[in-house]
Image (cartoon, rainbow, N blue to C red):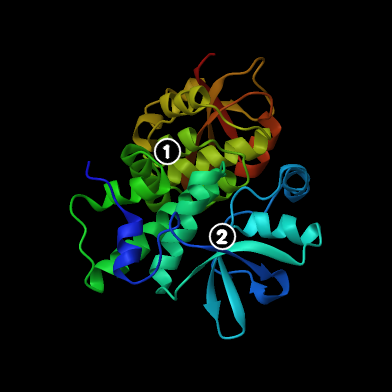
């Protein structure tokens, strides 16, 4: 894979090379944070202690604005420095870049210097793709696959980027909420994204009812017991039991209710929440389809 050289693009646009520019001290009061920064500014106190002990090892990157300087890279460090009440801070001043190049500089700097959350990684991939596509429209030339260039900047593998894009495109809204909230791992989210949205919704309902973070094993079990309506209708009538007759042990079941003169079915992997499932689905009957 040919290396994506961001500094070469920046040089083409008369911007900067970070390892050759002079470092200058700028008053903190003159620096404004960038509204485009989506990276979490966390663990500031811990970073401030480190800076107070050994000093600032990496200067901030700023660009001139109409009323001072705009911060391009180093938001977490800047927050720590302000907590230490520094009057000035070492900075590299770039000449004015277009918004796409500033976005790429922000992303590349953060992905190289800190550990990101999964949500930050996904957002970095999305914004990098948008910036590169916009630069192409403005006449910049990139050889090779776009995904490889995104990987070079974000430090993600092309295969991982493909999974992120599949999740973004195919995962249900409930699944995305669970992923963002840490209730769903990226690997399970990716496997879920391969399922029809209706089955994803059934699985997320199951997860919320059980109040647990699902594993790949549980998702696989769910996929194995999930049954189409046509198959359910072939279940012998004598298998069905009224909901008042509860299962004696955890089992995989089909719940049924009659609505508008037609039977509606739902497959569920039961742990210990039979009553919750019956209530939420308004089920009238159930039958065992697979013992654990």
Q: Earlier in the sequence, mark 1 or mark 2?
A: 2
Q: Quadrant of residue 83?
A: bottom right
Residue pictured at 77% horizontal, 67% vertical: 87
Residue extending furthest toward the left? 143
Q: Which residue is mark 2?
A: 38
Vertical placement of residue 92 versus 249, above or below: below
Residue pictured at 62% horizontal, 32% vertical: 213
**Residue 201 placement (x, y as % from top left):** 50, 45
Secondary element type, mark 1: helix
Residue pictured at 60% horizontal, 25% vertical: 270
Vertical placement of residue 231 versus 97, above or below: above
Secondary element type, mark 2: loop
**Residue 17 placement (x, y as % from top left):** 40, 59
Q: Quick one: 108 or 125, which is closer to the camera?
A: 108
Vertical placement of residue 157 versus 197, above or below: above
The tag on residue 131 is none
Q: How many marks?
A: 2
- How far separated are the C-alphas under marks 1 and 2? 23 Å
- Can you say which quadrant of the picture contains the N terminus? top left
Q: Quick one: 194 or 77, which is closer to the camera?
A: 77
- 173 vs 235, left or right, is right
**Residue 230 placement (x, y as % from top left):** 34, 35
Q: Residues within 10 Å of mark 2 (few under 14, many from 20)?
A: some
Q: Is residue 240 visible?
A: no
Q: Quick one: 274 or 237, which is closer to the camera?
A: 274
The tag on residue 190 is 1
Vertical placement of residue 170 versus 133, above or below: above
Residue pictured at 61% horizontal, 39% vertical: 183
Q: Are marks 1 and 2 in contact (CB under 8 Å)?
A: no
Q: Quick one: 168 or 111, which is closer to the camera?
A: 111
Q: Residues within 10 Å of mark 1 (few under 14, many from 20)?
A: many
Q: Is residue 36 visible?
A: yes
């Amino acid at each position: 894979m040919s290396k994506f050289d961001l500094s070469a693009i920046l040089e083409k646009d008369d911007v900067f090379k970070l390892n050759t520019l002079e470092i200058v001290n700028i008053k903190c009061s003159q620096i404004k944070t960038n509204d485009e920064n989506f990276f979490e500014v966390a663990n500031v106190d811990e970073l401030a202690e480190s800076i107070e002990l050994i000093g600032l090892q990496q200067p901030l990157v700023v660009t001139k604005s109409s009323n001072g300087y705009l911060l391009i890279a180093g938001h977490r460090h800047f927050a720590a420095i302000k907590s230490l009440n520094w009057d000035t801070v070492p900075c590299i001043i770039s000449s004015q870049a277009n918004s796409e190049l500033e976005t790429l500089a922000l992303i590349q700097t953060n992905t190289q210097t800190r550990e990101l959350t999964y949500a930050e990684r996904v957002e970095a991939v999305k914004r990098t793709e948008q910036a590169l596509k916009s630069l192409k429209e403005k006449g910049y030339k990139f050889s090779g696959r776009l995904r490889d260039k995104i990987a070079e900047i974000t430090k993600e593998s092309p295969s991982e980027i493909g999974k992120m894009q599949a999740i973004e495109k195919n995962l249900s809204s409930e699944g995305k909420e669970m992923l963002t909230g840490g209730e769903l791992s990226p690997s399970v989210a990716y496997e879920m994204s391969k399922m029809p949205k209706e089955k994803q919704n059934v699985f997320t309902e199951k997860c919320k009812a059980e109040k647990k973070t699902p594993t790949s094993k549980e998702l696989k079990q769910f996929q194995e017991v999930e049954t189409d309506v046509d198959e359910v209708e072939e279940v012998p009538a004598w298998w069905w039991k009224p909901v008042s007759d509860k299962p004696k042990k955890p089992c995989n079941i089909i719940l049924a209710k009659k609505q508008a003169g037609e039977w509606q079915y739902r497959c569920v992997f039961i742990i210990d929440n039979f009553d919750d499932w019956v209530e939420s689905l308004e089920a009238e009957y159930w039958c065992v389809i697979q013992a654990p």
